[in-house]
Image (cartoon, rainbow, N blue to C red):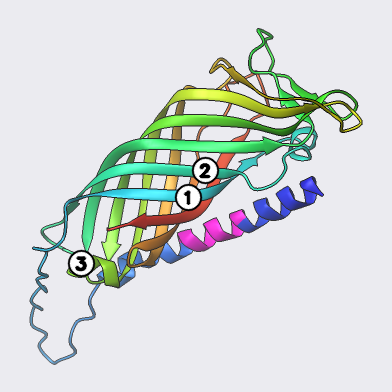
């Protein structure tokens, strides 16, 4: 059941990411204005928007779902439930003088991702040359178990707003990249059980180690929506784990953004 849910979630996330990319492709066409038809066309005066009430800095909060693309079946079949994530950035937005519908935004913040497993331990605390994903079907296992990573990130976006004078009441889209450096990686297991499902203890066991994870992350991003709410997608261009220690797995993140711009 867990494998089927994960496969369906991954399929839906892939489709949504493609849809977001397709919608953001309208940025350039929406930014263009159709010239008036006449025998002797005259240059059209650029529209000037009132940006006096538009804030230049703002918070951008994102909640989403994660997927590990390229994970072998032995791992993917053990990923269970909804793989939750949350990002929070402080952004600085600067409109272009030549076209106020377009702006460039840069910021800094934190991105946290969780991957939940059913009857599998990820041995990030060992000193093996290869990261072990341990199947615990027939031995002691945790009722709840997850792998968490946290990155200090710097996003950069090219933005389009149909009416930049009223950013809270207009269509908007953005494409960009974000660069991150790993600040925390850990596993957390709760409620240890035996192979029969009987509780051994209810404590929480946590292991912290960044040893097997890539220390940096580069992701392509896209957003599209209306007002303060946009759908977002982020596809990792770098692998989650260091070369040679695990399969070449990349992250895909989809979700909802709440932001003033």
The residue labelled by disc 3 is 164
Q: Residue at x 68, y 27 (%)?
A: 189
Asked if the stretch drawn in magenta spans residue 17, the answer is yes
The residue labelled by disc 2 is 85
Is residue 171 left or right of 208 when viewed as pictured? Answer: left
Residue lying farthest bottom? 39
Asked if the stretch drawn in magenta spans residue 143, the answer is no
Report the span colored magenta.
13-21
Q: Quadrant of residue 90?
A: top left
Task: Name above or below for residue 151 compared with residue 229.
Answer: above
Is residue 3 left or right of 155 when viewed as pictured? Answer: right
Is residue 119 left or right of 17 when viewed as pictured? Answer: right
Q: What percent of the width, then of the height, locates residue 257? A: 41, 55
**Mark 2 to mark 3: distance in Å?**
29 Å
Q: Main secondary structure of the magenta part?
A: helix
As helix, strand or loop, the secondary structure at mark 2 comes to: strand
Sequence-wise, the earlier of marks 1 and 3 is 1
Task: Name above or below for residue 169 compared with residue 151.
Answer: below
Which of label 2 and label 3 is nearer to you? 2
The residue labelled by disc 1 is 63
Q: Quadrant of residue 134?
A: top right
Sequence-wise, the earlier of marks 2 and 1 is 1
């Amino acid at each position: 059941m867990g494998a089927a849910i994960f496969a369906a979630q991954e399929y839906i996330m892939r489709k949504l990411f493609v849809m977001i990319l397709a919608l953001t492709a309208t940025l350039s066409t929406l930014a263009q204005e159709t010239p008036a038809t006449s025998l002797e066309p005259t240059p059209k005066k650029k529209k000037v928007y009132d940006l006096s009430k538009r804030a230049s800095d703002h918070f951008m909060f994102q909640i989403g779902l994660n997927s590990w693309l390229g994970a072998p079946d032995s791992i993917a079949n053990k990923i269970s439930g909804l793989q939750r994530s949350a990002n929070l950035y402080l952004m600085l937005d600067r409109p272009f003088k030549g076209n106020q519908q377009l702006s460039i935004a840069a910021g800094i913040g934190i991105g946290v991702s969780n991957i939940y497993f059913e009857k599998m331990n990820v041995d990030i605390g060992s000193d093996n040359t290869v990261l072990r994903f341990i199947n615990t079907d027939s031995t002691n296992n945790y009722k709840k178990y997850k792998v968490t990573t946290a990155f200090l990130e710097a996003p950069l976006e090219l933005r389009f707003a149909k009416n930049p004078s009223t950013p809270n009441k207009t269509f908007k889209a953005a494409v960009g990249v974000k660069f991150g450096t790993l600040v925390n990686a850990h596993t957390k297991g709760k409620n240890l059980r035996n192979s029969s499902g009987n509780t051994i203890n209810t404590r929480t066991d946590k292991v912290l180690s960044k040893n097997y994870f890539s220390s940096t992350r580069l992701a392509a991003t896209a957003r599209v929506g209306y007002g303060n709410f946009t759908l977002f997608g982020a596809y990792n261009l770098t692998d989650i784990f260091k070369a040679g220690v695990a399969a070449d797995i990349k992250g895909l993140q989809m979700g909802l953004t709440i932001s003033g711009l």
